[in-house]
Amino acid sequence: MKKIIIALFGVFFVAAAQCADASLPAPRVSIFSTSTDWQAVTGLTLNEYNGKFISDKKLVGRGLVLYYLDGFPCYGLGYGVRVWVGPDGKTDNDLHIACVATPREINFAYRNATRDADQATTTGILTCPVRGRGFELTIDLSDCTVGPNWDDYE
């Protein structure tokens, strides 16, 4: 009986050592967003804002795909968080976000791509000041700051 217990412990420790191997992929993390309850947390009313873009030929190039990154006081609404801006200033969508206050600055993940390009990994972060009246926002891409590429976050 003693030998069986020792053998089981040995198997257990070998298995544990293999699981601790650094070459194994990191587990995926599931995050629940607290942003869905900002209205209750702050006591402020959520309102929907629509954003239009003013193109910048230098930044846009052949085209610019933008993905809105949630951040207080706003979170993206599913049908309006991805926008493609063309070199001629045309877009395939408007930005649609819900906010408890008018945002002054927003962040996007971005990549340069033509309109019909496949979805791919973005390049990095783009931080843009926002102008607005009422629930209509304007994002002038020439005023945006290109932040670090994702590789710089490692």
Image: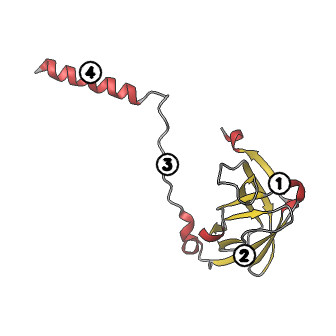
Measure the alpha-carbon separation of dots 2 and 3. Answer: 31 Å
In this figure, which residue is indicated by the disc labeled 3? Answer: 29
Residue named by callout 1: 145
Label 2, on which residue?
Answer: 50
Residue type highlighted by circle 4: Gly
What is the basis of the colouring in this image?
secondary structure
* Front of the two marks 1 and 2: 2
Label 2 Cα neighbours within 10 Å, binned few <14 / some 14-19 / many ≥20: some
Q: Amino acid at mark 3?
A: Val
In 3D space, how far apart are the residues under numbered discs 3 and 1 (Cα atoms)?
Answer: 29 Å
Quarter containing the N terminus: top left
**Residue at numbered disc 4:** 10
- Residue 11 is situated, as x and y percent measured from the top left of the image, at 27, 24
Element at label 4: helix
> What residue is drawn where x is 85% and y is 54%?
61
Q: Position of residue 147 (x, y in %)?
A: 78, 49
Left or right, residue 6 beside residue 121: left
Label 1: how many Cα within 10 Å (few below 14, some 14–19, many 20+): few
Q: CA distance from mark 1 to mark 2?
A: 21 Å
- In the picture, the quarter occupied by the C terminus is top right
